[in-house]
Amino acid sequence: MTVRDVEVWTLEQRVSRQHDVRSVPLEQAQARIARERRQREPWQRADESVAHYDGVEALASDRATILFKRSGERVALLQGVAADEASALHWLNGPEGDPFNAAIASLGGTRAWTQHEMKLGL
């Protein structure tokens, strides 16, 4: 059974924008995300999954917070909350209608594909 669709967005070019962003302790960012998230995370980015990743870092501003992981030249956004589209950053497996999806689109990003989140009843 399909539960919902999630979107994978890509941004082909690097975009520099002015943001008042700072590194914050991981626990502080996780608490804010848990408090402000609007929807359940897909399993790939659920709190239980992220807890098993090494090298997770956190950034925050007054209007947004993200958890991310670096892998060589690539940065994967794992979780995030944003007050609005202008506050959001790059996104992977964003639920339809999430502000991060619109933010990537406004920067020239493209939706690479849509995945169906499924539930298996046992």
Image: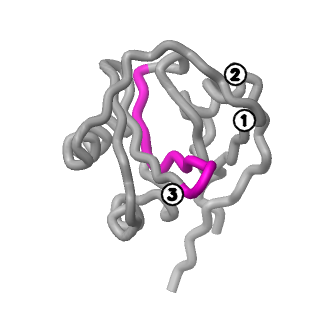
Nearer-the-camera pick, 61 or 6: 61
Q: Nearer the viewer, mark 3 or mark 2?
A: 2
Labels 1 and 3: the sequence-earlier one: 1
Count neighbours of disc 3 (C-alpha within 10 A) and say few if under 14, some if 14 to 19, many if 20 or more: some
Quadrant location, the N terminus: bottom right
Expressed as whole percent of the image width and height from the top left, the position of residue 60 reads 33, 30
Look at the image and give the residue range highlighted in magenta. Answer: 71-83
Expressed as whole percent of the image width and height from the top left, the position of residue 43 reads 49, 64
Q: Nearer the viewer, mark 1 or mark 3?
A: 1
Q: Which mark is residue 31?
A: none
Mark 2: which secondary structure? loop
Seen in the image, is 114 located left or right of residue 72?
right
Labels 3 and 2: the sequence-earlier one: 3
Expressed as whole percent of the image width and height from the top left, the position of residue 3 reads 59, 59
Mark 2 to mark 1 CA distance (whole Å): 8 Å
Q: Amino acid at mark 2?
A: Leu
Count neighbours of disc 2 (C-alpha within 10 A) and say few if under 14, some if 14 to 19, many if 20 or more: some
Mark 3 to mark 2 CA distance (whole Å): 24 Å
Seen in the image, is 33 located left or right of residue 44?
left
- In this rendering, the answer to whether 80 lies above or below 60 is below
Q: Which mark is residue 107?
A: 2
Q: Amino acid at mark 1?
A: Leu
